Image (cartoon, grey):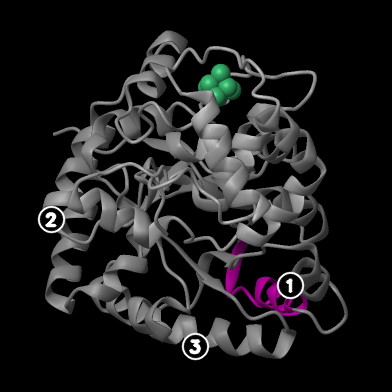
Amino acid sequence: MSTLPRRTLGDTGLQVSQLGLGGFHQVEIGQSLVTQIVDRYLEAGGNYVETARSYGGGVSEIKLGRALQGRRHQVVLASKTGQRDAEGAWREINETLQALGSDHLDLLLYHGINDLETLDRLAGPGGAAESFARAREEGLVRFVGASSHWPLVLIPAMERLELDAVMHWVNYLVTCNYPEIYARVAPAARQRGCGIIGMKPLGDGYLYRSVEPAFTYALAQEVDVLACGFNSLEMLEADIAAVMAWERPSDAALQQILADAPELGDYVCRQCGACHLPEADLPRVFELEGKFDQQMIDGRPTDAPDYALRQRLNNWFDNRQRAIELYKPLCSRVQALLEQNATLPACPYGIDLRYKLRMAHAKLAGSGKFPAGEFHF
Ligand code: SF4
């Protein structure tokens, strides 16, 4: 029987299955189902189990700890703390170990380092880094990593926190919204020998129609393990099947996935660069729109599941204000383009650039003046 293939987590040497079990959504289901999911995951050759102290206030750790009883040695076990000071981090590390029923973690991550101020606190006097180092010295933790929803912060974090692994999004939607992940963050991680843990390969469920292409795309990126939030046996089976069937796609096949993706359609910018103008960097405008709302609000009618997901996810990462700030140097140039009714290039993905530019500008300039009758928050 074939099992989930493994990759090496950077220079840690840990062998991790390409499909990881992410613990966030285990909070939403009962213990019996969590145990069934863990049973099936291990049976399929899965061995990367990751959670966080904050998931359900420890509930995810408790459920996974129970499900792993007697099998702790079969998995690479990871958790995260969002505590920023040494005292809080030390307390949570010990709470995590108790909840998981383990005397050590293979990987402990700083949870959600999203800005430089947080990084300063973590790395400064009395910061959580002191407890991470102590935990390592005392054998409570083998390796250290960090996750982020503003991935560029991971570059200085790798250096200042001596990280062994980083965790950021890996899916084809996020490629359109955070192109810096593969242009800058992943290369920097590899240069340091850091492992790369991809989160949200199915975009928090937004790519639910596209499980196979989503995994085909995600596993072709620079990544060692994809932590996925399956919380039903059906979802787990679909993910296992997609990962087991994976073969490295050609560049053309990857481009085709981006072209065909129903979630991207003729609205989401693929960052091909073809509409860059001397007057204004339009790909950057659309990238910032992606940071604002993942380019999910397109002002068009859609079906109920899609609408519900967009409503839930469009500001999930709370990066709107930053996108607005970054847009300020571009704002007057885009305004002028729109007022002059300038001719815009054709987009190879069929995106109506004038409409999209009006939408992006309205969001990022904060005017609230969206194309008439077409936009609802
Ligand atoms: S031409 Fe289309 S896909 Fe390419 S950067 Fe512009 S909007 Fe994006």
* Residue assigned mark 2: 233
Residue at figure coordinates x 65%, y 44% from the top left: 194
Please tell me how many numbered marks the rendered image carries.
3
Which quadrant of the picture is home to ligand 1?
Answer: top right
The three-letter code of the residue at mark 1 reads Ala
Q: Is residue 131 magenta?
A: yes
Label 2 vs 1, first from the N-terminus = 1
| Mark toward the viewer: 2 or 3 | 2
The three-letter code of the residue at mark 3 reads Glu
Magenta residues, start to end? 128-145
The x and y percentages for residue 363 are 58, 50
- Residue 89 marker: none
- Residue 133 marker: 1
Residue at figure coordinates x 30%, y 51% from the top left: 205
SS at badge 2: helix
Labelled pair 2, 1 in contact (Cβ < 8 Å): no
